[in-house]
Amino acid sequence: MPLPQSRALDRSAFLLAARGEPGPHTPVWFMRQAGRALPEYRAIRQGITMLESCMRPDLVVEITLQPVRRYGVDAAVFYADIVLPLKSAGFDIEIKPGVGPVVADPIRDAAGLAAVRPVTPADVPYTTDSVKQLVSELDGTPLIGFAGAPFTVASYLVEGGPSKDFAKTKALMYSDPDLWHALADRLADVAIAYLSVQVEAGASAIQLFDSWAGGLSPRDYERFVLPHSAKVFESMASYGVPRVHFGVNTGELLGLMSGAGADVVGVDWRVPLDEAVRRITAAGAGPKPVQGNLDPALLFAPWEAVEPEIDRILAEGKAAPGHIFNLGHGVPPNADPEVLTRIVEYVHAKSARVPA
């Protein structure tokens, strides 16, 4: 079971919003805030591969804390990668700079499925160590653990790397649905095991990234993906921590993704938050708290253009029982950290609530 939370942590702005309860202000954190845009991150990562850095608790702790110190965000997100548990369990996958995850032997038949074995806590001891240390150092700031959803991780394993059209993945779904479901089921177990390690070490919330689910039609999502994501969320329910679900370009899937079992639904910038709440509610899975959804491209615009967009998003977020301010996707690597700091300060000031 997860470690007991302190009173300060339990009443944090992030966890209150995730539970749909009023808090002192609208909480803010940024996907991919740990790393990428920060010069201190680039300095500490020199000469160290991405996956190697994820296996060193000293680096994981420092990199996770960097954006909390600099931006003043309301939650830390664990520094890792969605393919880390597979790599730790012996699967031949690497992260190629400038490309992303690359698989030596893509899975195209039943024989390839054997390479995906269960993940145990013994495979990721550095994750347990890192989370425990982070919880101690973060004090009252929640730590978000995360994992890759079965479809998104499977797409890398089947395609052999990143893809724009997921042609091989979709072809496998239709040509051999039994193999597809067997693969997705194993990856659901990998996600459950990895998320459980993080929560049992003290993470206060989890996020399941189905980053590329937006490439699917609602029919295909419901048939090939929903049961496996639902398995992950159902398995994590007993921990009692907020469960966030996020994907890119998933406006047509918001109701289905919420129905998979998420407590909070992440929304990219393509759908206004009030419309997202309407779609989630209409699907019979809401209303629920939402997370999002400033277009990351606005980080490069003049502040005069950013401010009214923040105001709009804060106003639209009031349609939900809780709103966690975030970008509609991850922080771009060439973003100006000062802009992110300014966004956090502005959201906190603009949304500050007078105690009852």
Image (cartoon, rainbow, N blue to C red):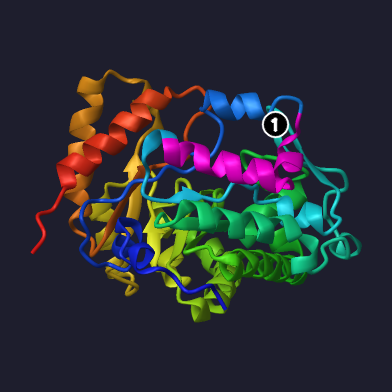
Q: Note whether residue 32 is visible.
A: no
Q: Quadrant of the C terminus?
A: bottom left
What are the residue bounds of the magenta stretch?
A: 48-69
Number of residues whose C-alpha sits closer than 10 Å to that of mark 1, classed few (under 14), some (14–19) or many (20 or more): few
Helix, strand or loop at mark 1:
loop
> Residue 230: x percent and y percent?
54, 73
**Image spot of residue 44 (x, y percent):** 65, 29
Asked if the magenta segment contains residue 60, the reply would be yes
* Residue at screen point 51% across, 27% down: 37
Image location of residue 216, percent across then percent down: 54, 54
> Is 246 positioned to the left or the right of 184 in the image?
left
Q: Residue at x 69, y 48 (%)?
A: 57
In the rendered image, the quadrant that contains the N terminus is bottom right
Report the side of 95 relative to 198 (left or right): right
Identify which amino acid the numbered label 1 is placed on: Val
* Dominant secondary structure (helix, strand or loop) of the stretch shown in magenta: helix
Taking 299 as reference, is 77 left or right?
Answer: right
Write down the residue under mark 1: 99
Count of numbered circles in the view: 1
